[in-house]
Image: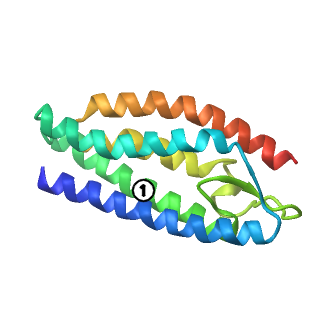
């Protein structure tokens, strides 16, 4: 359980680093006339992600979920790969990356890095991490609940983002 708590703590630290980058990029975008779209769904996304990071260790502790190596190690690999993909997206988008949907008028659509192959590669990382992180320690209820909640939120988010990018 201590190692799992450390893993959750590392993911929390990564998320906080993301928020620092996002806040800096939001200021950059707004200074250049950036427009935010779909702000109403953003608090729900934050709540879902905070819920994931709280519920997974709570489920492990409260329901005495075991670490099953045949599941845990591959899921840990997926978590690490998801982080790599997420930061590849952040690096590729540069100042245009954000946790919010913000479009700076006149900037071209990014079509390099993972965006050569996928329109929304960061969401692939989110889906993979949301499923894998709880399953590292067999917190399957959290994995299921987050996956369902995230699917609903991403349906809204992708629709908002596609509409914003079309402007």
Residue 65 visible in the displayed image: no
Image location (x, y in percent) of residue 116 = 71, 56
Q: Residue at x 59, y 61 (%)?
A: 89
Q: Secondary structure at mark 1?
A: helix
Image location (x, y in percent) of residue 152 = 55, 28
| On screen, residue 76 above or below 149 | below
Image location (x, y in percent) of residue 64 = 10, 35
| Left or right: 144, with 139 as reference point | right
Q: Residue at x 28, y 59 (%)?
A: 9
Q: Quadrant of residue 134?
A: top left
Q: Residue at x 75, y 66 (%)?
A: 30
- Judging depth in this view, the residue of 150 and 30 nearest the camera is 30
Q: Quadrant of residue 52?
A: top left
Q: Identify residue for label 1.
A: 81
Mark 1 neighbour density, 10 Å: few (under 14) some (14–19) many (20 or more): some
Q: Quadrant of residue 70?
A: top left
| Left or right: 30, with 99 as reference point | right
């Amino acid at each position: 359980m201590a190692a799992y708590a450390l893993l959750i703590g590392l993911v929390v630290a990564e998320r906080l680093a993301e928020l620092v980058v996002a806040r800096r990029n939001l200021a950059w975008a707004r200074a250049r006339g950036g427009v935010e779209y779909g702000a109403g769904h953003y608090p729900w996304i934050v709540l879902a992600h905070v819920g994931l990071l709280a519920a997974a260790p709570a489920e492990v502790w409260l329901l005495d979920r075991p670490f099953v190596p045949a599941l845990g190690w591959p899921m840990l690999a997926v978590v690490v790969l998801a982080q790599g993909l997420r930061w590849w997206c952040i690096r590729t988008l540069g100042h245009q990356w954000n946790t919010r949907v913000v479009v700076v008028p006149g900037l071209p659509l990014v079509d390099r890095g993972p965006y050569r192959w996928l329109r929304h590669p960061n969401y692939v990382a989110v889906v993979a991490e949301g499923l894998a992180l709880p399953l590292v320690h067999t917190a399957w209820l959290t994995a299921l609940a987050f996956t369902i909640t995230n699917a609903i939120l991403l349906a809204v988010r992708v629709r908002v983002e596609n509409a914003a990018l079309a402007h």
